Amino acid sequence: MSECIFCRIVAKQIPATVVHEDEDTLAFMDIGQVNPGHVLIAVKKHADNIFALDEAQASAVFRSATRVARAIRAAFEPQGLSVYQANGKAAGQTVFHLHIHLVPRYEGDGMALSWPVKNPPREKLAEYAEKIKARLA
Ligand SMILES: [Zn+2]
């Protein structure tokens, strides 16, 4: 069994609230919701960070992120959306498996992110995920 928590999520060994899945990526709700609709896009094949992506993975990750971002916009109508990826401990990363965060932003939100952030119950995540999935259909 892989030691990488994201590889285990991709392998469905750890439950996650999935909003989208394709050949190359898995998109799921972050349990630490900065705002309703916070989604992580993980590349399925393990890559430590963005520097390890090949061209096909890079295209796939951004295609998936763009598609899910549009669904988040349709579902939650945020005033903005932050897209970020961190590399390394000094950047605050604790999981070394490439993933992109999509964070809907609303007027009055601070830009600073802190962990742990709000942790809604899992049924709330399922409700958020359903709203996004409805817009992806
Ligand atoms: Zn991994």
Image (cartoon, grey):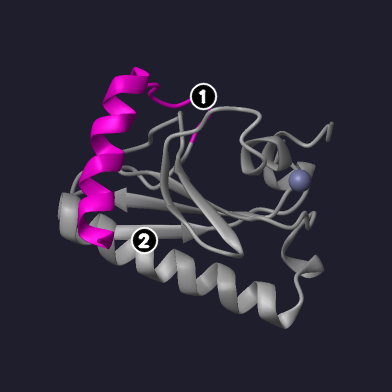
Residue 78 in view in this figure: no
> Disc 1 marks which residue?
116
Residue type for callout 1: Pro
Q: Which residues are magenta?
A: 114-137
Residue at position x 47%, y 39% in the image: 113
Q: Which mark is residue 68?
A: 2
> Is tag 2's residue or tag 1's residue first in the polypeptide sequence?
2
Q: In the shown orientation, is residue 103 left or right of residue 2?
A: left
In the image, residue 86 lies in the stretch drawn in magenta: no
Front residue of this view, candidates 65 and 45? 45
Residue type for callout 2: Val
Where's residue 127, x and y in %? 23, 32
Residue at position x 45%, y 30% in the image: 32
Number of numbered discs on residues: 2
Dot 1: element:
loop
Q: Which quadrant: the C terminus? A: bottom left
In the image, residue 134 lies in the stretch drawn in magenta: yes
Taking 43 as reference, is 8 above or below it?
above
Residue at position x 36%, y 61% in the image: 68
Predominant secondary structure in magenta?
helix
The CA span between labels 2 and 1 is 23 Å
